[in-house]
Image (cartoon, rainbow, N blue to C red):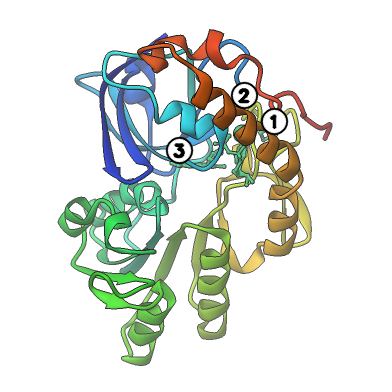
Amino acid sequence: MFKIIHAQFLAPGIKRFVIEAPRIARKQKPGQFVILRIYEEGERIPVTIENSDPVKGTINIVVQSAGKTTHLLNMLETGDSILDVVGPLGKPSEIRNFGTVVVVGGGVGTAMAYPTAAALKDAGNRVISIVGARNKELVILEKEMRAVSDALLITTDDGSYADKGFVTDKLRQLIENGTRIDLVVAVGPIVMMKAVSALTRKENIHTVVSLNPIMIDGTGMCGGCRVLIDGKSEFACVDGPEFDAHKVNFEVLVQRNAMYRDSERQSMEEFQAREQSASVEPMSRKIGETWGTPSGHATQGEQR
Ligand code: FAD
Ligand code: FES
Ligand code: MG
């Protein structure tokens, strides 16, 4: 069991957890993730390590409620525990002095991009960060990103905070202003990473994206996270999650991520129905016995 030392909402539906995991905290590098399982019969989900404290033996994760498992996770509170936390997994981000790096974070992707931005800054890069969110409430880690950036540009889709528009508008402006850019790192929704990639391909700017395919075992065995890179199959859990954006087949990623949409919707509906009828308190301590086996894709691995 992995104890939650602290849990706090950063924005509606987005929660940060500080978890006791000394071995992972000692080994973790920027860009890596953990796979966690909340209860015995629950599915495994991958979550990026946002920060770690090797001395205290803790790691931080930031989780956005997307479906059943992330909703359940975000019901956990300080003092609760998570059944399994496996990691660190995946290849770390490539950190060296590239020159000027633009780090783009969309939504919860900002938390995933943060450790890489911090390490790139430490390595001597000039870091320009662009953070985008749907609205003011969903802008996360502004203070943290500012602290590791030479400049921080913020956009909201609805203009409720900072500049109205998309992260790609800011990136385009930087390019049009003649800013020298040696590397772009983009983490966020697939549509955002695809748009960033299309923009930088034209300008021949090396771009790295962190892909988010469905993962199950995280060890390269199940084939669930297969992505198409330069026409070849790779496994995001062991070969990634970061890849050269200009080689990624985003259409295949979108298709594969939608494969279990019906079971995901069904799981979420069952979850909401049970949540309404449940009378247990506190909810988080009863998760296993209250929610039982998810009907999602927990066991729907596929062979390589
Ligand atoms: P569901 O309703 O089951 O699914 C909603 C959508 O999430 C699906 O359509 C699919 O696109 C995706 N998804 C579902 N199951 C999985 C799975 N097992 N693995 C990957 N994607 C899945 N989210 C965060 O909030 N914070 C993070 O730091 C973060 N880091 C990630 C790092 C990696 C390497 C990857 C691959 C994904 C990361 N995600 C992160 C996404 C997160 O794993 C999914 O939102 C979560 O698994 C959804 O589970 P669910 O049951 O709540 O939703
Ligand atoms: Fe990558 Fe199984 S999650 S191969
Ligand atoms: Mg799920």
Q: Would the CB of label 2 be found within 8 Å of ligand 3? A: yes
Label 1 vs label 2: CA separation? Answer: 8 Å
- On the rendering, which quadrant does ligand 1 occupy? top right
* Rendering quarter of residue 301: top right
Label placed on residue 43:
2
- Determine crowd level at label 1: few under 14, some 14-19, many 20+ residues with C-alpha closer than 10 A: many
Q: Earlier in the sequence, mark 1 or mark 2?
A: 2
Residue 225 placement (x, y as % from top left): 69, 41
Q: Secondary structure at mark 3?
A: loop
Residue at position x 65%, y 26% in the image: 217
Q: Earlier in the sequence, mark 1 or mark 3?
A: 3
Determine contact: label 1, label 2, CB under 8 Å.
yes
Q: Mark 1 — residue?
A: 296
Residue at position x 33%, y 24% in the image: 25
Number of the front mark, 1 or 2? 1
- Determine crowd level at label 2: few under 14, some 14-19, many 20+ residues with C-alpha closer than 10 A: many
Label placed on residue 32:
3
Q: Would the CB of label 1 be found within 8 Å of ligand 3? A: yes
- Determine crowd level at label 3: few under 14, some 14-19, many 20+ residues with C-alpha closer than 10 A: many
